[in-house]
Image (tube, helix red, strand yellow):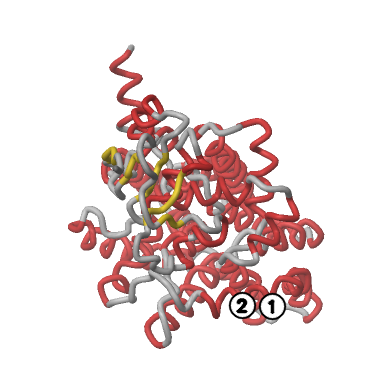
Amino acid sequence: MNALFNFLTFHTPLFYLIQSVWRDEAFSYFMAKPNLLKIIATTAQDFNPPLYYLLLHLWMYMAGHSDIGLRLLSFIFHLIGSYYAYLIGRKVTDRKFAVFIFLFYLLNPMLLYYAFEMRMYSLYAMFTTLTLFYLISKNWKAYTVSAVLGLYSHTFFLLLPLSFAVYAYILKKARQEISLILRPLLFFIPWLPIVISQFIRSKESWLFPVDWQLINSVLGNLFTGYEGTPWFLWKYTFYFSMFIIFCSFLSLRKKIKTALLFLIPLFLPLLLIVVYSVVKRPVYVNRYLIFITVFEVFAVTYGIYAVRNKTFRFALAGILLSLVVFFNFYIVPFRKKTDFKSAFREINANLKNSDFVYARTPIGYLESAYYSASEKKTFVYNPKDIAIPNYIGVNVIFKNISKFTYPASPARTFLVADDASFEIIVSE
């Protein structure tokens, strides 16, 4: 029994639920702690809209400070998105094949990974799926609500109603329908000045340039959540990118109108982001484009559904689902976060009232503050008073956290490195 438990928790995607939080997750926690008005004001200084932090704040009343409890909010979003994927499958395919679409969405490596992360990406994917479903259903009130909530989940959601409007224009839909598709943007106007300000400030960024290797593999990367570790998977994500393109063309054989509803929001935003990243400055990050993963799921499954021979269709679906399950198991060890949780079990067990915790660099500060038993006595060791970059997120939440010297004896300082190792400093 213990062997089975260890296997499930350390060798399956359940590991994402129990492993140590990383910097962005700790950032989410601290962003969501204050009152609701403070959250909105603080979010305006960051790079994302406030909806996820507001929901996480409310969720904290039940989950408290539990890693698992806090992450489960994202998993709930993923389950809702999976259910709506099934409903979409029922509308565009048939009842049996809709079950495959449900499983393909539920087990998608990219969506599943962020279903266990304390960030807004699972919420973002969920509203993408809901918005698509209500568009197909022509339930315009529900479409508007889900799209507006999506816009306040992640700024890149702006590309979704714009893509739907292009789809409607190509299919020569009535002007009234195009205006209904774009209507959610009106409710985002109050936040637009903040988005512009955030975009200008984001010039100071950690984002890597988009190169030819990424362009070749981008579809496969977005489907699997692959970001370069292990390095040798690049060629496989390239092959899978080719498979996604093949399924996309195959889907056009079934029903062009339905296929384009999946393909335009898949390829148009991706093209815009990649071109802008190459020509102007990098804005491409896998997780920022998780809504494209949603459309990859539907493009691939609808392409398989276009296969006329039912036996071959379900055989191909079964093989593909098996490969997805295999990848979910295979990739787990390569997605392990730095284990601050274990380090702070030891630190907290030895921490006295007079002691302090210093993060050696700002990179490890948020995790240290999250796990420290003495958050108010946790600082960044910064003897040269170097300005902390905004993109690390520390400046948004914490003020005056830099310390230039160690406290005098008898106080001890637990100096925590970015790899979660630590040493104890006692000053004379």
Q: Disc 1 designates what residue?
A: 193
Q: Is residue 148 left or right of residue 314?
A: right
Contact (CB < 8 A) between labels 2 and 1?
yes
Residue 122 place in picture, x, y as percent: 54, 50
Q: Which of 393 and 161 is in front in this view?
A: 393
Q: Which residue is depicted at the point 47% across and 59% down?
A: 293
| Depth order, front residue of 30/262 | 30
Up the image or down, 267 lies above or below 133; here it is: below
Q: Please tell me which residue is depicted at 30% across the width and 70% down the height of the picture.
A: 214
Residue at horizontal 55%, vertical 55%? 398
* CA distance separating discs 2 and 1: 6 Å
Residue 299 shows in the view: no
Q: In this view, does 183 lie above or below 86?
A: below
| Label 2 packing within 10 angstroms: few (<14), some (14-19), many (20+) | some
The image quarter containing residue 331 is top left
**Would you identify the image quadrant in which residue 65 lies?**
top right
Q: Classify mark 1: helix, strand or loop.
A: helix
Question: x%, y% of residue 324?
Answer: 35, 45
Residue topped by disc 2: 197
Three-letter code, disc 2: Ser
The C terminus sits in image quarter: top left
The disc placed on residue 212 is: none
**Relative depth, front residue between 265 and 259:** 265
The quarter of the rendered structure image containing the N terminus is top left
Specify whether 336 is left or right of 258: left
- Label 2: element kind: helix
